[in-house]
Amino acid sequence: MTLTLDAIPSPFKPTPEQLAAAAGRGVPDVIAAGLRVLFCGINPSLYSAAVGHHFGRPGNRFWPVLYRAGFTERLLSPFKDRSLLAQGCGITNLVERATAAAAELAPRELGEGRQRLQARVLEYSPRVLAVLGAGAYRSAFARPQAALGRQGETIGQTVVWLLPNPSGLNAHYRLDDLARLFRELLIFCSGRSEEVSA
C-alpha cells in the first residue's frame, strides 16, 4: 500500500471520484506492541480508505463512543487516530480492503482475515482484542452463537472481546448503549473486572 498517514496532513472531505478510487484500498494499522486494547473493525469504508484514517466517515460513532466510554479524555478526530497509541489503544481491520458496505465481503475473505488478524495479535500481544461487529466475528471465527462481551477463547495470551459495530448504520444500538458496552471493556482493562457485572 502506497498511502501513508503523512500523505493526508489535515481533514478533508473526499470527492465522489476519490471515494470510487478508494475501493479495494486499505488503511494502515494503528498498532504497537503491548497495547491494552486493539480495536478491530470489519473492513474500511470507502470514506476511511479515501482519507487514510480509521472510522473516517463523519457519521461513524466510534470516536464519540470511545470518548463517552472513557477511553479518551477528549473527542478525537479520525485524522488523529494515531494519538490513540498514547492511550494504549490501536486499530486494525479483519479484512483490509475497503468496500461500500461490509456485506460485500465474502465468507472466505472473513476467514482469511481471521488468520491475518490472529498473526497480528500474536506478533503485538495486546491485552485485549476487541472485535467490532458481531455478525462478522461469528462468521470469521466460526462462532455462530457468540454473544457480546468477553469470549471463551484467547489468541495466545490476548483476551478476545466482542462489541457491536459502531457504524451509524447499526440502528440496533444507540450511542448511550454503545458507550455502556465499551465502558465494560474499559473497566475490564483497568483491572476492575468485578464491576462489569454490576
Image: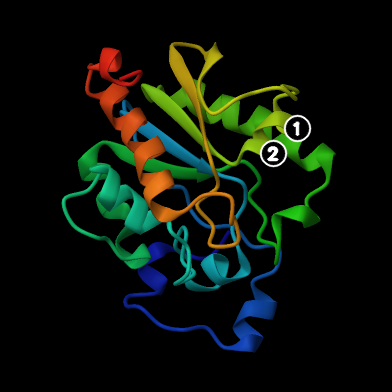
In the rendered image, the residue lying farthest to the left is 73
Image coordinates of residue 69 in percent, x first then y, are 28, 43
Looking at the picture, which amino acid does disc 2 mark?
Gly
Image coordinates of residue 98 in percent, x first then y, are 66, 60
Eyeballing the image, is 78 above or below 43? Answer: below
C-beta proximity under 8 Å, tags 1 and 2:
yes
Image label count: 2
Looking at the picture, which amino acid does disc 1 mark?
Ser
Q: CA separation, marks 1 and 2? A: 6 Å
Pick the front one: 189 or 118: 189
Image coordinates of residue 165 in percent, x first then y, are 55, 47
Q: Quadrant of the N terminus?
A: bottom right
Residue at (40%, 24%) from the top-left corner?
Answer: 128
Does residue 62 appear to the left or right of 89 in the view shown? right
Eyeballing the image, is 80 above or below 9? Answer: above
Q: Which residue is mark 2?
A: 135
Pick the front one: 172 or 53: 172
Q: What label does residue 139 carry, if any?
A: 1
| Numbered disc 2: secondary structure | helix
| Numbered disc 1: secondary structure | helix
Residue at (54%, 57%) from the top-left corner?
Answer: 167
Residue at (63%, 33%) from the top-left corner?
Answer: 116
Residue 10 seen in the current view: yes
Image coordinates of residue 140 in percent, x first then y, are 72, 31
Q: What label does residue 109 carry, if any?
A: none
